[in-house]
Amino acid sequence: MATPAKTPTVFAPWEDAAETPLIRFRNVTKRFGEFTAIDALDLDIYEKEFFALLGPSGCGKTTLMRMLAGFETPTEGEITLAGKNIVSVPPNKRPVNMMFQSYALFPHLSVWDNIAFGLRRSDMPKDEIGQRVEEMLRLTRLEKFARRKPHQISGGQRQRVALARSLAKAPKLLLLDEPLGALDKKLRHETQFELMDIQEKTGTTFVIVTHDQEEAMTVASRVAVMDHGKLMQVATPARIYENPANVYVADFIGEVNIIEGNATATGGECYDIAWAESQPVIHAQSSEPLAADARVSFAIRPEKINVTAEEPTDRPNKMRGRIHDIAYLGNISTYHVEVGGQIIKAQMTNSRRLARRSFTWEDEVWLSFTDTAGVVLTS
Amino acid sequence: MRRFSWFNATSLTLGFAFLYFPMVILVIYSFNESKLVTVWAGFSTKWYGELLQNEAFLDAAWVTVRVAVMSSTIATLLGTMAAYTLVRAGRFPGRTLFSGMIYAPLVMPEVITGLSLLLLFIAIGLDRGVTTIVLAHTTFSMCYVSVVVSSRLMSFDRSLEEAALDLGCTPWDAFRSVTLPIIAPAVISGWLLAFTLSLDDLVIASFTSGPSSTTLPIKIFSAVRLGVSPEINALSTIMIGIVAVGVISASLISKRAAIQREREERQAAG
Ligand SMILES: Nc1ncnc2c1ncn2[C@@H]1O[C@H](COP(=O)(O)OP(=O)(O)OP(=O)(O)O)[C@@H](O)[C@H]1O
Ligand SMILES: [Mg+2]
């Protein structure tokens, strides 16, 4: 996955105890009647962050955004922006702009007027408004469509108008609810980098909802994985991927093998996980101490598992299995290997041409990985 | 498409004849030369000319137009406000009761509405005249406006107003610059509807009008009791024309707006 070109000094205000967060959710609950959409949530977002919200449909991402924008009031708890409780501040008084999931473009106004809408309600002088709108049109490549009405442009163009409109006022905090979903891959990548560029130039704090994990990984300083109105983990993209806090996050982000077993300590941070009777134990490490004979889930990414025809000699973990299926994806292949009654996925880059690959369906192969390749999860 | 059968053609003709034959007769006889309404004596527009000389009719026409313009304007204002509150304000105590009550005049017999208004005006000592007719017409046409406007508001995407607030509008500014332009066709057709309703109302006007403020329908009705004259036919023809224009443009406006909306939504979805 592509990583953004970050500034040389590491940007990690969340690790600095002296930093005060820009946004702070304190024990925030939002109920719609009986239904709890946001459940006692605590969250800090720092200035200049690019904060991504990930989670399945209906987990409360939009609700969280709407509380920041001021369209929903929390049932309980408080939300502070720059140290000020904003729960009772109306949306038009907040230094926050939102790009709506449904775009919410004004159908009776041209693209130009849609983008100028917010600027006209600020104290910006008229000629500056014109310049700013032109700048936004250039940025989103909509110059040619400035005079059209929203129903006269395509879905992707509409999305860009919505983006331009929310960017125009250069707010302190920008909320983007699935801003790039309707764009094709190329334009999406360009816009992602454009967003990061804008963010670097203006220092705006972004909170972005996305269904695209790769997008979250590419643009975000930190990612929050949500489920049923709760935060499952908040961490940098790399940590989320390499050190998921629980099975849910491991499973939600990318592909993963989950192997359940019982862990026994073997000294230090090392543990042996017994997972299938006929199979050797898995040697793994866990920085968190585990109870004796604890029931654990061992999570390991497919690309961390090697597939070989001969028995490897240098790996602490190896197991023998039979190839059940091969998914050829061009640059990589995913092998579905049956071991101890479970299918384990392993990924190898296709450095050789197809015809010269050494194994095929029903072949007996060796799977191997290091003792730090996977993580031991207890929840 | 289904074939256009003889049965369909016949029933269509019969239905339309039933609806419009009387009016067609009236329109034809308004161009009758003869003073006797039922004897055709050749084509003439002289009764229209006579009409222009008739002070009483012209006065009544002027009252009617004034009443219609004023009452439909007030009704549009109040009806739009009521519709907005009912659709937008969410739950508040008595909402169901309120929304039921606003539609009650639609089914209330006009005689009862007229009578109760008359009693009210007498009770508060308001002299009957143009003002009382305007008030009465506002009362009953407001709910028609409210029906038209609230059906448009219900299909209105709420997030448009939120976007306006988000971009710095006050709630009133958001209503004025986003909601109102979008629901304008419904508001206009509500106004036209209220206008035509006021124009041809007889029952409520006769309860609430005073001696100096006779409306055209009242005038026609009382004139006809002394015998139908070709002049009345001419006058009625003009009224049919005005009402038809009003109703047709109201429905055209809302139909065009609906088509436009549908197209926008289809394109937004695609
Ligand atoms: N006004 C409302 N009244 C009742 N329930 C609501 C309301 N708004 C949202 N919900 C419920 O709250 C939950 C969270 O909704 P939300 O829109 O935040 O989901 P989301 O994470 O944004 O989903 P998606 O990815 O599909 O956009 C959903 O189950 C939804 O049905
Ligand atoms: Mg959503």
Image: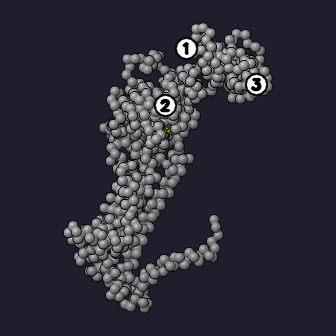
> Marks 2/1: CA distance?
25 Å
Q: Is mark 2 within 8 Å of ligand 1?
A: no
Residue lying at 43% horizontally and 27% vertically, measured from the top left:
A43
> How many dots with numbers?
3
Q: Residues within 10 Å of mark 1 (few under 14, many from 20)?
A: few
Indicate the position of residue A76 as horizontal and vertical percent values.
Answer: 39, 34
Which residue is under mark 2? A230
| Discs 2 and 1 carry the same chain letter | yes
Which residue is under mark 1? A289
Q: Quadrant of residue A340?
A: top right
Question: Which chain is mark 2 on?
Answer: A
Screen quadrant of the N terminus of chain A:
top right
Task: Specify which label sits upstream in the sequence, 2 or 3.
Answer: 2
Q: Amino acid at mark 3?
A: Ile
Q: Is mark 1 within 8 Å of ligand 1?
A: no
> Marks 3/1: CA distance?
35 Å
Q: Is mark 3 within 8 Å of ligand 1?
A: no
Secondary structure under the numbered disc 2 in the rendered image: strand
Task: Give the answer, above or below, for where B117 lies relative to B33.
Answer: above
Which residue is under mark 3? A323
Q: Can residue A278 be seen at all in this image of the molecule?
A: yes
Screen quadrant of the C terminus of chain A:
top right
Horizontal side, residue A230 vs residue B76: left or right: right
Q: Amino acid at mark 1?
A: Pro
Question: Which chain is mark 3 on?
Answer: A
Task: Give the answer, above or below, for where A170 lies relative to B72.
Answer: above
Q: Nearer the viewer, residue A123 or A95?
A: A95
Indicate the position of residue B246 as horizontal and vertical percent values.
Answer: 40, 68
